[in-house]
Amino acid sequence: MRGNIAAVARALAFVALALALCGVMFQAVGFSAIEMFQSIADGAFLNPGAWQGSLRWAMPLFVTACGVVVSFRSGYFNVGAQGQFYLGAIGATFIVDFLNGYPALLVVPLAFLTGMACGGLWAAWPGYLRVTSGTDEVITTLMGNFIAALVLTYVTGGILKDPSGTGQVMASRPVAEAYRISSETGLSPTIVVIAIIVGLLTWVLVNRTAFGILCGLAGRNPTMIVWQGAKMSRLGLAGFELAGALAGLSGVIEVLGPNGRLVSGFLPAHGFTAILIALVAGLSVAGTAVVSLFFGGLASASLYLPVLAGLPAAAIDIINAAIALFITARAAPGLSRLFPRRRAVGGA
Amino acid sequence: MEDFVVAILRYGTPLVYVTLAGVLAQRAGVWNLGLEGLMIIGSCASVVGFVQTGSLLFGFGLAIVACVLASALLWFVVEKLRANAIIAGLGLTGLGLGGTDLAVQAVYGSQATVNAPYGLPRLGPAFGAFGVLSVLVAAMPFAVFLTWVVLRRTRFGLQLAACGEHPFAARSVGADPSTMRLIALCAGGVFCALGGMELALGSLTIFAYGMTAGRGFMAFSAVIFGAGHPLASVAAAFFFSIVGALGIRAQLIFGDRVPNDLLLALPYIATIVGVWASARLRGGGPTGGFGELRDY
């Protein structure tokens, strides 16, 4: 328990450090840091109704982050959540577009399955290359993100293009009303239930199944896992698949939920944020739920900033990036001298 | 043919400079995924510095200062705070992308691009078809040679490699790995500034948000492909540039028959193939070993 409190305190300390760096940057380029943070807090949580916006963003982020937790726990840096998210959205759009007119009870589950399968497939090839030949998964998944973005432009400008749309905006036909799982607000019982189910299942998987425990061990000590007789490659591939499927699921939620159509370049950048959430939460599922709310708030504020406060939305990207810079830090210079760490004999 | 070589050099020069930065970091033992961010900081600082003061030299200086500072920040976080280099590098990349966006909006309001009045000095008509290339393209072979000499033929280079491969050995001959990494990252920052500057002012004379479009990551892949050897990594960078230049050429020729987006994806696919091939030939790296994160 004491370890948990210390972990939370550390995470908070580094987030605070990141925010301080952001404040300095805002001031340096000529914005008032106080005004900036005030507006972000307003847009995220303080304004009436802001909570709804934050929740709307928190839920797809949480779903993606759950996948990242599993993948990172097994020791693989699958940073391709963004591409897998795109592919999930594309897969779902294909289904609702081609099966338009069939009963929703058939189409919607099929769209969900296809989206998850597409996301899983987009995680499968980096995972396969990783476990068969040791190809660095950081590079392959990053490149996969760029390729997925091009696939998105391609399908929205070609196969899925809405013929009635203007030439400037490349978008698919709007999803039929019957297939939508929420309105523009992105808050509906369906999405909440999906997020809760995903959260519960991931928690059980990670903490209460042999697979989850082995994954956690694999991330800490791959050698030991091999001695235990578990297949490192199988664990890793399963982690990749799960991460991809959940990122894809989040893409389906965005398309059938708040977005209502596939627009090129306008899908939110959930992938990177989800990785951050998982890291800030220290790869714990319960922590991920809480941290998702915070980053959901930031995502919501990035829409609020330019429209209502007249401040650039890039401020949110900077806050996210600064947190990424510091969050994995394991030492604080000076502090170790003030609080010497007592180590138990034979272990940390 | 000459046109095609010009196209390769145009595409490849920024990539080669950033690859050199990656080689320096890699040999010192830092996986620098912040290259993408450093590169865009270099592009942005050079253009904004140039446009604001009207002096190309000031833009040049500003780009170098900004990139070196950002590199030093990465060093501090990775070396002194013992953060995971991959995540911290991605964070620096995000900071570069967001920071340049914010800086441009702060200075010029909400506009997507910043136009510079003119670009870097060109080689001039004396060089025939190559006259359209900038001086930084001409300086590139020297930069590669210099890096090769320093890394492979000097005591410093040997000690730097030791810092990456066996820090204990480096320490035993009096080379402090931490300091050596700072030097390598800051020198890499200078190269990133040059690469970013060539990208923005070499042939385009504009800065646009996200204009690096993954080139920093490509440079990083070139380092992996080239196993951290300066010449091999530069060769890998040229391989990616040839594919990129082919893609641009193919757009002009087959643009109406083959989807454009597919051709744009060519360099990314080449990068994946390259990293895969190098893993097959030499064996891949160890798994991430992310576990320490939870061992508080």
Image (cartoon, coloured by chain):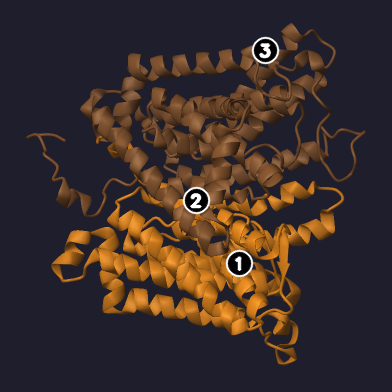
Chain colours: A brown, B orange
Residue type of the residue flagged with mark 1: Cys
Q: Position of residue A200 (x, y in %)?
A: 45, 14
> Is disc 1 placed on a helix, strand or loop?
helix
Marks 1/3 same chain? no
Q: Position of residue B241 (x, y in %)?
A: 62, 63
> Is disc 3 placed on a helix, strand or loop?
helix
Q: Is residue A339 left or right of residue B116?
A: left
> Is disc 2 placed on a helix, strand or loop?
helix
Q: Is residue B57 left or right of residue B284?
A: right
Residue type of the residue flagged with mark 2: Val
Dot 2 alpha-carbon crowd within 10 angstroms: few under 14, some 14 to 19, many 20 or more: many
Q: Which residue is mark 1?
A: B44
Q: Residue furthest right?
A: A164
Q: Chain of mark 1?
A: B
**Which-is-in-front pick, marks 3 and 2?**
3
At horizontal 58% and vertical 27% (from top left) the residue drawn is A51
Mark 2 or mark 1: whose residue is earlier in sequence: 1
Q: Which residue is mark 3?
A: A109
Mark 1 to mark 3 CA distance (whole Å): 46 Å
Q: Which residue is mark 2?
A: B275
At horizontal 60% and vertical 43% (from top left) the residue drawn is A145
